[in-house]
Amino acid sequence: MDKKDKDDIYLNLLNKIQEQSKETQNTVIDLDKKVDLHIQKTEYELSRINALDEEQNQLIDEHIAGVKTLKGIYEEHKKENDVRFQALEEPRKVFAWLFKATGIVGVICGAIFGAIKLIAFFI
């Protein structure tokens, strides 16, 4: 092999390396573009997620405030109803007491009447 053949082989080899280098460079450039697009899409999605997160946090805060308001209204209403129910229960309690008292008085009167009849029977 002479020097010219060796040079041709080296030149061909260098040309192949150069072509492969260009192909690799183009592939890297394409991948870099894809990665950049993916990063942009991810950044957009993250910003959208953060916006939705803020919106949901605001809705949750409003919900919690509403629940606290309703709890206060419920407790106030319960206190008012307890007072009303106690007022409504008073006549029933009085009637129950009167019924017991009438029963006791009736028993006492019956006993006295029975005692008088018994005494009158022996006299």
Image: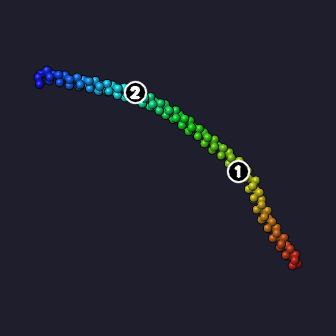
Q: Secondary structure at mark 2?
A: helix
Q: Is residue 53 left or right of residue 17?
A: right
Quarter occupied by residue 34: top left
Measuring from the top left, give residue 39's x and y in whole percent.
39, 29
- Classed neighbour count for the residue bearing mark 2: other residues with Cα under 10 Å, few (<14), some (14–19), many (≥20): few
Query: Do the residues bearing badges 1 and 2 touch, measured as CB atoms within 8 Å?
Result: no
- Visible residue check, residue 95: yes
Question: What amino acid does circle 2 point to?
Answer: Leu
The residue lying toward the viewer, choosing from 115 and 102, is 102
Q: Secondary structure at mark 1?
A: helix
Tag shown at residue 41: none
Q: Is residue 47 above or below residue 70?
A: above
Measuring from the top left, give residue 5's x and y in whole percent.
14, 22
Q: Is residue 67 left or right of residue 114?
A: left
Check the picture and name the quadrant holding the C terminus.
bottom right
Quarter occupied by residue 74: top right
Q: Is residue 75 left or right of residue 14?
A: right
The residue lying toward the viewer, choosing from 106 and 73, is 73
Quarter occupied by residue 69: top right
Please name the residue that numbered disc 1 is placed on: 86
- Residue depicted at 44% across the width and 28% down the height: 44
